[in-house]
Amino acid sequence: MKNFFIVLVFACTTLTIQAQKKEKNQKPQVYGIDSTKVTTIDKTIKSLYDVVSGEKGEKRNWGQFKFLFYKDAKLIPSGKNKKKVHVASFMTPDDYVKNSGKWLVENGFFEKEINRKVQRFGNIAHVFSTYEAFNSKSDDAPFMRGINSIQLLNDGKRWWIINIYWTQETTDNPIPEKYLPKK
């Protein structure tokens, strides 16, 4: 019986080690990070919209998403709470993925930039980016519109998103004409 127990422990240990080796050798699905998508303000903004957008069931490249952001960057949604008071909440890029990633994949989400105003001074830039959101590319009308206020920094090599602060359009707060496409 003692020998059986020793053999059993040895077998279990061997199986555990083999299973761990297989896990280490198995590579998770990883999307590549394209460093050329942050060389200009335009490419950085387009990459931001592209990486969060996709059909229902389509995985997002969260590695590329996180690559857009500078250390300690924040994503700041704002709007009225239940008491009708304007509030803002603060998230890291990781928080955004954790809080919104599953919903984006389960529901489909396409965020399309429809207008942009850029202000730049040296290595800093501010982009007011008006967007429309759809559940699918085939949708005729957006289910939501709003403005992303995006602050960026150029470190001499690339553009980094420092913050994205946004709010949705409401009946009480329509998007001003100056932030909509010219007719």
Image (cartoon, grey):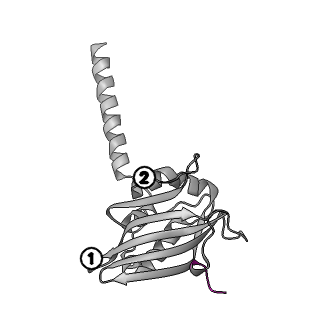
Q: What amino acid is at disc 1?
A: Asp
Q: Which mark is residue 155?
A: 1
Q: What element does badge 1 sit on?
A: loop
Q: Nearer the viewer, residue 96 or 28?
A: 96
- Residue 180 belongs to magenta span: yes
Q: CA distance from mark 1 to mark 2?
A: 25 Å
Q: What are the residue bounds of the magenta stretch? A: 179-183
Q: Nearer the viewer, residue 72 or 48?
A: 72
Q: Local crowd at mark 2 within 10 Å, few (<14), some, or many (≥20)? A: few
Residue 24 location in percent, x, y?
Answer: 33, 49
Residue 37 location in percent, x, y?
Answer: 41, 77
The answer to whether residue 27 is visible is: no
Q: Is residue 4 left or right of residue 106?
A: left
Q: What amino acid is at disc 2?
A: Asp
Please tell me which residue is depicted at 33% across the width and 83% down the height of the picture: 121
Q: Local crowd at mark 1 within 10 Å, few (<14), some, or many (≥20)? A: few
Q: What element does badge 2 sit on?
A: helix
Residue 122 location in percent, x, y?
Answer: 30, 83
Q: Quadrant of the N terminus?
A: top left
Residue 112 location in percent, x, y?
Answer: 58, 73
Q: Which mark is residue 164?
A: none
Q: Nearer the viewer, residue 51 or 140?
A: 140
Q: Which mark is residue 95?
A: 2
Rendered view: 118 above or below 144:
below
User: Which quarter of the figure has residue 105?
Assistant: bottom right
